[in-house]
Structure formats: structure tokens, C-alpha cells
Amino acid sequence: MDDARIVRSPYPDIEIPDLPLVPFVMHRAAVHPDKPAILCAATGRQLTYSELDRAIRQVAAGLHAKGIRKGDVVGLVSPNLPDFAVVFFAVTTLGAICSTVNPIATAEEIGAQFADSEAVMLVTIADLYEKCTTAARLASTVREIVVLGTTPPGATPYAALFAHGDAAPTVAIDPATDVCALPYSSGTSGVPKGVMLTHRNLVANLLQCEAAGVGIVSTDTVIGVLPFFHIYGMVVVLGGTLRQGATIVSLPRFDLEQFLGTIQQFRVSYMNLVPPIILALAKHPLVASYDLRSVRTIMSGAAPLGADLADSCAARLGCLVRQGYGLTETSPVTHFHPFTGERADGGSVGPAVPNTECRLVDSDTAIDVPAGERGELWIRGPQVMKGYFNKPEATAACLTADGWFKTGDVAVEEAGWFRIVDRVKELIKYKGLQVAPAELEALLLSNPHVADAAVIPVPDEDAGEIPKAFVVKRGETDADQIMAWVAERVSPYKKVRQVEFVEAIPKSPSGKILRRVLVERERDRARAG
């Protein structure tokens, strides 16, 4: 550690209060009880701050009556609905642990997660009940399924949880050690693992974002289109907006027309988004049909956002576009581009948030790299997870004894500002030189004939690996034109050497390009012939 090059946050350290998550997030409920806290754009269902506060206490009392105790895991399988917030915060009020899952996951995937997390109860919606019933058979610890809305036979009605008063039992919670959220992440390997996030992790991260000026104010209307089951939607959108006393307008799923209509109807002013949605805002012709002048700020996360795309979206909408960076294992935010100040570097994720230290380490030698060079980003701070649930070996592989979390992401740092350039395991090695797929993808997206793009390595006898681009094209173009256009703008070793046109780029719900899907598809083709 003596030769470690530690880059500290430029912000002064802040004090992290010793508080459980719910009282910390809901501290403004009594200040403006009648203000809408969260409303569903699809159904019109709305909860004011006082209604949300009371519903959390009622459901906590109901869950306790059903036998949920401190340390129990409750699975939540639901799209973005107002009652998602109620259930999530009711579970954590009891000192229990909420484990969220993508509602489009298969029964086998849901079952595997809840078997691994030892969930004792699932909460879902009627449309997903059959799938969750199958999942529960795979997770033998599940003893009850609660259903929001219309209740199928065999399920427990959500309404039944409201029949036990609004005095939630008092539970002794140690914020530093007690886990409140258990989202699943693949981390630096492909096997999903339960990420143990404590009350203190989430409280710290919300405060770190506030102290660095994340930008949400109480008068904002914030769109809740990012999935709440994902750490970005869960903490930054749900927790961050409610903490500020602003209003969330939630959407159960992303549909561009409905999304644009919601912004127009509710005068949305602040949006947490991912690059694929920003790409649509920058390039899709439908955007011109809506009045989006209310939008003041867009914060991008979950995947790298190129400077050209950020600038084109900002110019089209007349708003500020910034990006941040984080991981499920860091609750999630570790960096974000400041909203104020003279420096504006669209491709950067900015400096680290308060109380956060960073290192850039050569992943082969474990030696810290000099400023300006690529290295794996390591992070230390109060937002770093407790570890992976029941996975001590996986925890030890990415979390050092002195608290450094190895992100698996490759970054470059200059003057305390960071640029994420790729994943450690996704770098293309062209004749021994590193080529970052994300860099080429950002460049391709600035081409007016490219609607979307992904870049992967493909084996090559001479070079070892070469970059291949999968492109969703806009208008008339061909592979040679695309390759020539890129070649004019990059070093010779970075040139795209193959192009395949596709209908869509495979992506995760949070907007990350699923390069491994494209890699596997390419391998299957090679094996076939």
C-alpha cells in the first residue's frame, strides 16, 4: 500500500448519521404531507407524502403479523408502481431485507435468486403470480406470496397487510451492519450474486450525492422510468427524490411515446436516464412532436455516455446533460460530473463523491498506474457493500482486506476527474494493444447514419483480436462507409475491421450493452461453419 496512488474526492468529508434508511429518506413527510410523493403515469394512482408514510407503517405492521422478522429476506417482483416504494420501505422498517428482481426474468431465474437469498416471502403483481409460484417451488424457503391488486386463488391479498393498524413494531437496527437491500449483480464475473447493502451504505450514498450537488430539489418532478428493482432506480430515483421531498412520476415500463407524453403532461423537470433513452431523445423524430421544455436536467448512468451524444441531447432539449458512475456494489454512486463550475467534459463521469477514495491499478500486475494511463478502478468509501451474500470467496476476490472494491471497470484519471473507458474483461487486444469497445461505440453513435452500435472482439489469426461493430443503421449506408468513417477518426490499431447490420443491440434493463450475447452469437457461428 505504500506505493498506492490514492486519488481522494475533492469535496470535504461529510458526517454520516447513525440512522436507519426509512426515517432518513422520509424525513420531509411531515413538512408537506399533502404533496404528491409518487404517482403512476399509467394508472393515475397517487400517494401523498402522508399517505406514503402511513402505508409504509401499515404494511410493516402487516408483514410483522405475517411473521416477517429482522434479517428475513422478502422478495419483490414488480414493475415501477407506487406500492413498490411502500413494500420496499416497509420491509426495511422491520430490519428485514428486500431483494428485488427484474419482473421480466424467467421463473427459473427468479427461483434461483430467491433460493440463493433464502427468501421467506414474495411480493408481486397478479400478472406475475403464476411465474412467481413456479419460482417459489424452486426456492423452498418461500412460504407465502403476496399479490398487489387483483388476487389470484392461493395468494395473499396485499390489502390484508393493511388490517393490522399503522403502528409498526420498533426494531433495533444497527445501520452499520444490518443489511436492508439485497439486489443481485454479476459483478466482475457472470454469476449473479446477492449484494449486501446496509442501511448505512444507502444513507451514506444519498448524503454523498447531496453534498456533491446531485441537483434534485423539492420543487422538481422526477420521472421514474428506470426500474426500481435496479440499484440506480432504487436508490438514486426512489430514495433520492423522496429524501428531497420532490415528486416521482413512475412508469411501469419504457415506451418512447408514453415516456414523452408523460414528460409533457406532468412537466417533468429532472430525469435520471440511461444512454439508450438519451440516444432516442437526441435522434428520434418522435421527440419533435412533444413539448419537453420543462426538462432542466438529465443525469445519465449505468453505461458510458459519449460526449457527442450528451451534447446533441442537451442541444435538442435545451437542458443540462451530465453523467455519473457507480455499481450495485457501491450503493451505487461513486462519481458524477458536477452540475456547476467552469469545467464541462461531457465524456467524463467527473470526480469522486465525498468520503470516497480511488485507485487505478494494472489488473495484471496489481501496481497503481500513473495519471493519464488506463487502469482498473478500485474504490473505497462508506457506500461500498458489506459483501456478497453467502459468497465469501467471491467477496474476497473483489474486496481487499483494507476495504478496496475492485470494480472491474477500466478508467483514466486526470486532475481528479475520471473517464470510464471499458470493462477489464471486454478490452480488445489488437496485436497486444488495448482497444476499448466503449470508445468505438461512442464514436459510432456520433455518425448520423448510426442509430445504435456495439463493438466486440472477434478472433483474428494475424492480430489476435479485431474490433467488430454491430450497427443499427439510420438511412442509407454500408459497411465500407462505416469502417472508412471510423478509420478517419482513430489510431490505425483501433479501426473497426468488420461491420454487421442488425435490427437491435441486446441490452440489459439498465441500458448496458450485453456484449457477451453478441460474443456468444459470433462463437456459435464460427463453430457452425
Image (cartoon, helix red, strand yellow):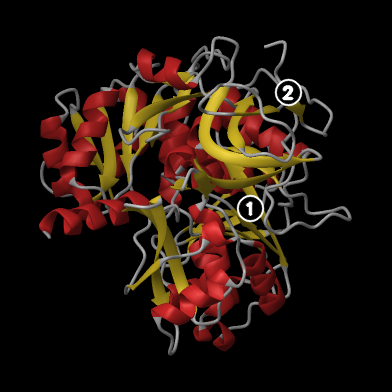
Query: Which amino acid lies under the numbered mark 2 shown in the image of this protein?
Result: Arg
Q: In the rendered view, would you say 158 is above or below 449?
A: above
Please name which of the two marks, 1 or 2, marks the residue nearer to the observer: 2
Name the secondary structure under disc 2. loop
Q: Which residue is mark 2?
A: 5
Residue at the extreme front: 462
221 with respect to 497 (left or right) = right
At horizontal 72% and vertical 69% (from top left) the residue drawn is 319
Quadrant of the frame with the N terminus: top right
Residue at the extreme right: 342
Residue 236: percent from left, percent from top: 58, 44
Give 461 or 456, whichever is nearer the viewer.
Answer: 461
Name the image quarter holding residue 401. Answer: top right
Q: In the rendered view, would you say 173 is above or below 229?
A: above
Q: Answer few, some or many: residues within 10 Å of disc 1's Cα (few below 14, many 20 plus, some between 14 and 19).
A: few
User: What distance separates the C-alpha of mark 1 from that of mark 2?
Assistant: 50 Å
At horizontal 12% and vertical 31% (from top left) the residue drawn is 138
Residue 9 seen in render: yes
At horizontal 43% and vertical 90% (from top left) the residue drawn is 476
Residue 422: percent from left, percent from top: 52, 46
Q: Which mark is residue 179?
A: none
Quadrant of the frame with the C terminus: bottom left
31 with respect to 281 (left or right) = right
270 with respect to 169 (left or right) = right
At horizontal 61% and vertical 44% (from top left) the residue drawn is 325
Q: Answer few, some or many: residues within 10 Å of disc 2's Cα (few below 14, many 20 plus, some between 14 and 19).
A: some
Q: Which residue is mark 1?
A: 34
**Label located before the other in sequence (1 or 2):** 2
Residue 106: percent from left, percent from top: 20, 47
Query: Which amino acid lies under the numbered mark 1 shown in the image of this protein?
Result: Asp
Residue 94: percent from left, percent from top: 44, 22
Name the secondary structure under disc 1. loop
